[in-house]
Amino acid sequence: MEIICKYSVYLKYLNHEDADLRFNALVLLGSITKAKDYVSVYRRCLRDKDTSIRALALRELNKANREDLLGFKEEIEEMLSEPDMKVKQAAINILKRL
């Protein structure tokens, strides 16, 4: 729980209405933490309306443990129908590992 409190400012900005702020918060979170510690946060970002945030979340999730990702494989597979190629490619990269 200490980890979440330590990085709460980044988590707070993931809910901001400005997509650029959300994206930057996600970049910063990923640069100073381990994806396996924030799988649920990255998973939530898969529903963001901004495609760059969804693609980044998938790239970060690709660093997580395979076992953690298997729990929501279907959700990742749904990302294959995204119109954005970066999102599709990031989803494909995860699915290759599963």
Image (cartoon, grey):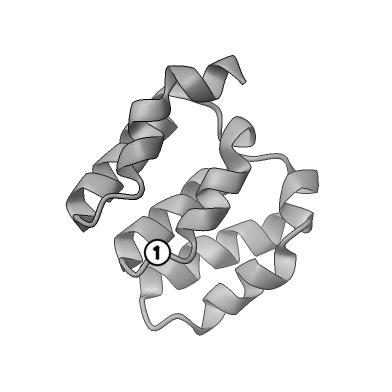
- Amino acid residing under circle 1: Asp
- Where does residue 22 sit, x and y in percent of width and height? 28, 48
- Where does residue 55 sit, x and y in percent of width and height? 41, 60
Q: In the drawing, does residue 54 fall left or right of residue 52?
A: right
Residue drawn 75% across and 46% down? 68
Q: Which residue is mark 1?
A: 48
Q: In the drawing, does residue 94 fall left or right of residue 49?
A: right
Q: Quadrant of residue 72?
A: bottom right
Residue drawn 57% across and 15% down? 2
Picture layout, residue 16 above or below residue 28: below
Residue drawn 42% across and 23% down? 7
Q: Quadrant of residue 53?
A: bottom left
Residue drawn 61% across and 31% down? 37
- Where does residue 8 sit, x and y in percent of width and height? 41, 27
- Image quadrant where one finds the N terminus: top right
User: Which sits in the foreground, 92 or 68?
Assistant: 68
